[in-house]
Image: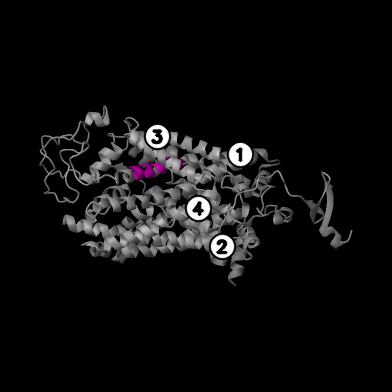
């Protein structure tokens, strides 16, 4: 048969004549039974989703504090150093993986079956994170609802939740007098059930000792929002207001993801762009406040001597890593909905730079207000600067009470936090949903709404302990341990698999198939050497300097340490389990089994059907790329 006749043949199927492409003597047929994967409707949808996923509430309540503690403007040097050498390469790697394969993070590591457990670990850590991360949205929603009151409830003392030691928000000096006359407002047994009077122990007969008490804003957070117990040992009961707000948070997530990327593509135009408008609005208003300039100077004034401290560089690397969110599966999953030839390098660079610059920009907004608070209280900025929920849910709301029409600014501020949190939650929860659907595509692909509803309901029930009196201790324990070690370990192994087992050259050819050009030598060097080395150093530093968290003077018991350790290793467990399972399934000697499980699975290949058959005919016999990759990189440098 002549060549031109072999290019296109026809065959009769069910009485119809259908064209079939012939490649290397084999017939390529479209699999009509294979469910079609959804795709982003517009290119901008994906870019905004990446930005929204990377930019979260941590950009506002952690990064500015790290700058303050680690040399101000000087901290930007290690931060952007790690953003370029660790953040962008790892971000780009995962985006390319998802776009090339067109599958979620759960199954993408069939490119190296021995390490298939990496994908399962990613989905597990995302699932665990969605459970406790919605606790943040729960509190934000409750604040947002209360922002519509005629008077902001955290504006002054005198409510049922306030104590006799409550004081005005800006009375920060030790000589401040307490609010009230030594009597308590309300009955603590009504608020906390059987919880003992832990917080007010010894305060009643000694109201004017060297204690300063809590501000109205802090008491609203502690005794109204959290209504916290004395510790993890006593979780208390589920608080109705938090349980309902948690339900509202999950309903929002469900509605935004009800049709997957088709509905999310519309939502991100609001959730990803609105925070920047509101941040700018808050910056303009903040700069008009007295003392704002002092706060900004305090924020950006460089102290280059801090750069001699190794911990500063470690914290910069960890901030880049945890802010961008690699190893959680969200990047792989969201990019799997891209068209095959999409320019994902451009999007990866835009998203990573947007994350870093947003963190820096948000610092101006935060410290302008903190400077105003310090001036009002007559103390140094460092006295009012804090990190975590204390900044977003105590300090900043207190400052809002001093602004004209505080309800208006409170609504805008908590709306901004809500949109920032929702975006990050979308990526993590979509990883879980897509993983389940990809596991049973024929059965579940057309039932996405029910899968999403079922998983959201399950996560809501599992997250109810965060709505209890001891919820803040549960939240902090999970936040402290879930992503502490496992994501660093997963990312390190991910770099080893791509750079040294699957092979950086083979992966570069895959990228060339998508975008028409291979990644540059700098990116490949980062994948093989620089990024895994930095991750390994950060992992060692994290383990060496790791301490148990504390909250408002509460020290976690030893049992919490054991529980935290279990939480931290759960996402790692699938990696050795699947290694043993894959070796057991393979045939031959142990060495032969290793070689079989180190080469891609038979169904690994590009998501584009046009290239799938030709790609599957390539030689996928395993060749150790350890030395070969090094020689190729050295040759490219010449």
Is label 3 in a helix, a strand or a loop? Answer: helix
How many neighbours does mark 3 have within 10 angstroms: few (below 14), some (14-19), or many (20 or more)? Answer: some
Residue name at image x 36 percent, y 57 percent: 278
Is label 2 in a helix, a strand or a loop? Answer: helix
3D distance between C-alphas at marks 2 and 4: 35 Å
Residues at discs 4 and 3 in contact (Cβ within 8 Å): no
3D distance between C-alphas at marks 1 and 3: 27 Å
Residue that carries the numbered disc 1 in the rendered image: 444
Residue 420 versus residue 114: which sits nearer the camera?
Answer: 420
Residue name at image x 27 percent, y 63 percent: 287
* Magenta-colored segment: predominant secondary structure: helix
3D distance between C-alphas at marks 4 and 1: 23 Å
Residue that carries the numbered disc 2 in the rendered image: 524
Is label 4 in a helix, a strand or a loop? Answer: helix
Is residue 132 on the magenta stretch? yes
Q: Earlier in the sequence, mark 1 or mark 3?
A: 1
Q: Nearer the viewer, mark 2 or mark 4?
A: 4
Residue that carries the numbered disc 3 in the rendered image: 464
3D distance between C-alphas at marks 4 and 3: 30 Å
Q: Which residues are magenta?
A: 128-142
Q: Earlier in the sequence, mark 4 or mark 3?
A: 4
**In the shown orientation, is residue 413 left or right of residue 527?**
left
Residue name at image x 63 percent, y 50 percent: 111
Quadrant into which the N terminus falls: bottom right
Q: Earlier in the sequence, mark 2 or mark 1?
A: 1
């Amino acid at each position: 048969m002549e060549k031109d006749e072999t290019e296109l043949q026809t065959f009769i199927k069910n009485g119809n004549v259908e064209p079939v492409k012939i490649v290397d003597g084999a017939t390529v047929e479209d699999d009509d039974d294979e469910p079609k994967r959804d795709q982003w409707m517009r290119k901008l949808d994906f870019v905004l989703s990446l930005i929204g996923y990377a930019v979260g509430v941590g950009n506002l309540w952690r990064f500015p504090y790290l700058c303050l503690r680690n040399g101000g403007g000087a901290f930007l040097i290690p931060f952007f150093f790690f953003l370029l050498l660790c953040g962008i390469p790892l971000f780009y790697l995962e985006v390319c993986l998802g776009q090339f394969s067109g599958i979620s993070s759960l199954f993408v590591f069939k490119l190296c079956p021995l390490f298939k457990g990496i994908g399962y670990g990613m989905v597990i850590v995302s699932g665990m994170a969605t459970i406790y991360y919605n606790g943040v949205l729960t509190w934000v929603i409750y604040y947002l609802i209360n922002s519509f009151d005629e008077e902001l409830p955290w504006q002054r003392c005198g409510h049922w939740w306030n104590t006799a030691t409550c004081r005005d928000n800006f009375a920060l000096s030790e000589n401040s007098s307490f609010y009230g006359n030594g009597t308590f407002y309300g009955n603590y047994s009504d608020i906390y059930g059987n919880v003992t009077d832990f917080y007010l122990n010894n305060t009643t007969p000694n109201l004017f000792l060297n204690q300063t008490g809590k501000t109205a804003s802090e008491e609203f957070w502690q005794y109204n929002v959290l209504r916290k117990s004395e510790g993890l040992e006593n979780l208390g009961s589920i608080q109705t207001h938090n349980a309902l707000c948690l339900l509202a948070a999950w309903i929002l997530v469900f509605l935004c993801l009800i049709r997957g990327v088709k509905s999310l593509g519309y939502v991100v135009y609001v959730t990803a762009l609105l925070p920047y408008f509101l941040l700018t609005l808050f910056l303009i208003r903040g700069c008009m406040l007295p003392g704002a300039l002092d706060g900004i100077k305090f924020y950006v004034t460089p102290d280059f001597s801090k750069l001699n401290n190794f911990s500063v560089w470690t914290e910069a690397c960890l901030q880049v890593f945890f802010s961008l969110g690699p190893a959680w599966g969200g990047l792989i999953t969201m990019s799997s909905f891209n068209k095959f030839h999409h320019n994902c390098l451009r999007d990866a660079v835009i998203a990573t730079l947007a994350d870093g610059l947003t963190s820096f920009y948000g610092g101006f907004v935060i410290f302008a207000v903190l400077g105003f608070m310090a001036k009002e209280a007559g103390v140094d900025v460092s006295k009012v600067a804090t990190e975590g929920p204390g900044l977003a849910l105590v300090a900043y709301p207190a400052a809002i009470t001093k602004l004209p029409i505080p309800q208006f600014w409170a609504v805008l501020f908590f709306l901004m936090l809500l949109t920032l949190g929702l975006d990050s939650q979308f990526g993590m929860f979509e990883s879980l949903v897509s993983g389940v659907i990809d596991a049973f595509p024929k059965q579940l692909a057309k039932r996405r709404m029910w899968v999403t509803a079922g998983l959201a309901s399950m996560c809501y029930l599992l997250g109810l302990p965060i709505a209890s009196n001891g919820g803040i201790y549960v939240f902090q324990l999970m936040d402290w341990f879930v992503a502490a070690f496992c994501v660093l370990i997963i990312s390190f192994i991910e770099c080893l698999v791509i750079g040294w087992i699957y092979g950086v050259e083979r992966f570069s050819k895959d990228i060339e198939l998508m975008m028409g050009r291979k990644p540059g030598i700098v990116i490949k060097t980062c994948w093989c050497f620089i990024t895994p080395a930095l991750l390994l150093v950060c992992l060692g530093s994290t383990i060496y300097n790791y301490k148990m968290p504390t909250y408002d003077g509460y020290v976690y018991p030893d049992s919490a340490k054991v529980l935290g350790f279990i939480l931290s290793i759960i996402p790692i467990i699938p990696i050795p389990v699947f290694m043993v399972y894959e070796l057991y399934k393979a045939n031959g000697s142990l060495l032969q089994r290793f070689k079989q499980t180190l080469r891609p699975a038979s169904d690994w290949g590009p998501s584009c059907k046009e290239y799938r058959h030709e790609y599957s005919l390539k030689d996928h016999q395993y060749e150790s790329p350890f030395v070969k990759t090094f020689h190729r990189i050295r040759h490219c440098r010449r």
